Amino acid sequence: MMKNVKVLTVLSLFLVNFFNAQVRDFVIEQPFGKKLYLYKTFGVFGGKEYSTNALYLITKKGVVLFDVPWQKTQYQSLMDTIKKRHNLPVIAVFATHSHEDRAGDLSFYNKKGIPTYATAKTNELLKKEGKATSSKITQIGKKYKIGGEEFIVDFLGEGHTADNVVVWFPKYNVLDGGCLVKSSAAVDLGYTGEANVQQWPLTMKKLQARYPSTAKVIPGHDEWKGNDHVKHTLELLDKQNTK
């Protein structure tokens, strides 16, 4: 019996390492203006690979990350790549909600003395899951000014999760919608295990009312190009709520 357990344990570790090895490395894509960059990381959910969209902002003081790579093994390599490309260190990390592809494992950055930011609600959820919380609390609605750049973190209401926030970059007319916003290429709402599907449409309406119709909205996953992500998210929600 013990021999069988050992064999199963070794097999499980092999499969975990095998599937992790199949996940693609991060990709840094085009900048919005000269300072705001989009990067993609990848992960497997339900046996299928998905991409996740995240941003980083170059300031005179250093680089601010908005969400972390989906794979913890890529945390250091992303920072190394940013340092090599921009000759600047990562000086802060802001999480848009508690999931693995957003907050991930903040202890990595905390141990390096890099300030990490999350809302009180996100920290509550992280703590409940036995995960590291942020070293600082994100102030909703505050205009953060760092090294000549600025951004605002906003909570519009529940949707994908109870803690999903968006990040507004007024200089670039870009809204990081995180997982609150689905890609126009999405065929469904994805993981809804912690979603408030009834509240989500109202939250999206607030988003539409608060930000310019010309804003470039970045969805949390899949294809980010195009301007129909908000509209498509509402269509998916309408389809879900009328079942």
Image (tube, grey):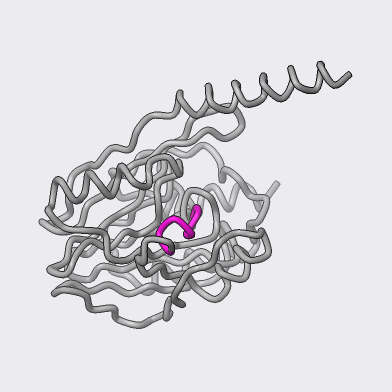
Q: Does residue 214 appear in the picture of this structure?
A: no
Q: Nearer the viewer, residue 144 or 165?
A: 144
Q: Quadrant of residue 27?
A: top left
Q: What's drawn in magenta, residue-wise? A: 104-110
Image position of 174 (left or right of 136): left
Q: Quadrant of the N terminus?
A: top right
Residue 103 locus on image (x, y percent): 48, 57
Report if residue 43 lies within the magenta region.
Answer: no
Residue 135 locus on image (x, y percent): 46, 72
> Residue visible at 48% across and 54% down?
179
Q: Residue furthest right?
A: 1
Residue 190 locus on image (x, y percent): 57, 43
> Residue visible at 46% across and 67% down?
165
Vertically, is 13 above or below 107? above
Q: Quadrant of residue 4?
A: top right
Report if residue 108 lies within the magenta region.
Answer: yes
